[in-house]
Amino acid sequence: MAEIINLRRARKARARASAETTAAANRAAFGRTKADKDAAEAEVARIDRTLDRARREP
């Protein structure tokens, strides 16, 4: 016999889980300080410069 579940509770639990994943993504995207954002941008620029210097011209 299958387990009896309350559909209202299941819907609410699924909505809570969805909201938590969205909140986690937002914390990662918007929860950084300006110094962290600037450091990440500088790192990307450094990597781009390194790759451009190593590129061979055809």
Image (cartoon, grey):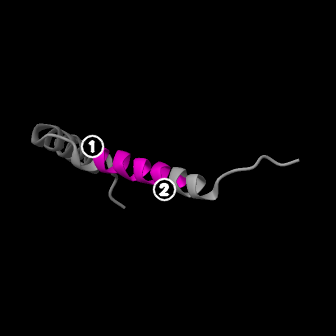
**Image position of 54 (left or right of 3):** left
Residue range corresponding to the magenta coloring? 14-28
Indicate yes or no whether the magenta region holds residue 39.
no
Amino acid residing under circle 1? Ile
Mark 2: amino acid:
Ala
Mark 2 secondary-structure assignment: helix
Above or below, 32 relative to 5: above
Give the label on residue 47, or none. 1
Give the left or right position of residue 11, taking residue 45 as reference.
right
Q: Which residue extends farthest left?
A: 34
Within 10 Å of disc 2 (Cα), the crowding (few <14, some 14-19, many 20+) is few
Q: Position of residue 17 (x, y in %)?
A: 49, 49
Residue at 14%, 40% in the rendered image: 33
Residue shown at 21% from the left, 41% from the top: 40
* Vertical side of 57 occupied by 17: above or below: above
Residue appearing at x 11%, y 43% in the figure: 34
Which badge, 2 or 1, comes first in the chain's sequence? 2
**Quarter of the rendering occupied by the C terminus:** bottom left
Which residue corresponds to mark 2?
Answer: 15
Q: CA distance from mark 2 to mark 1?
A: 40 Å
Q: Nearer the viewer, residue 51 or 17?
A: 17
Cβ–Cβ below 8 Å for labels 2 and 1? no
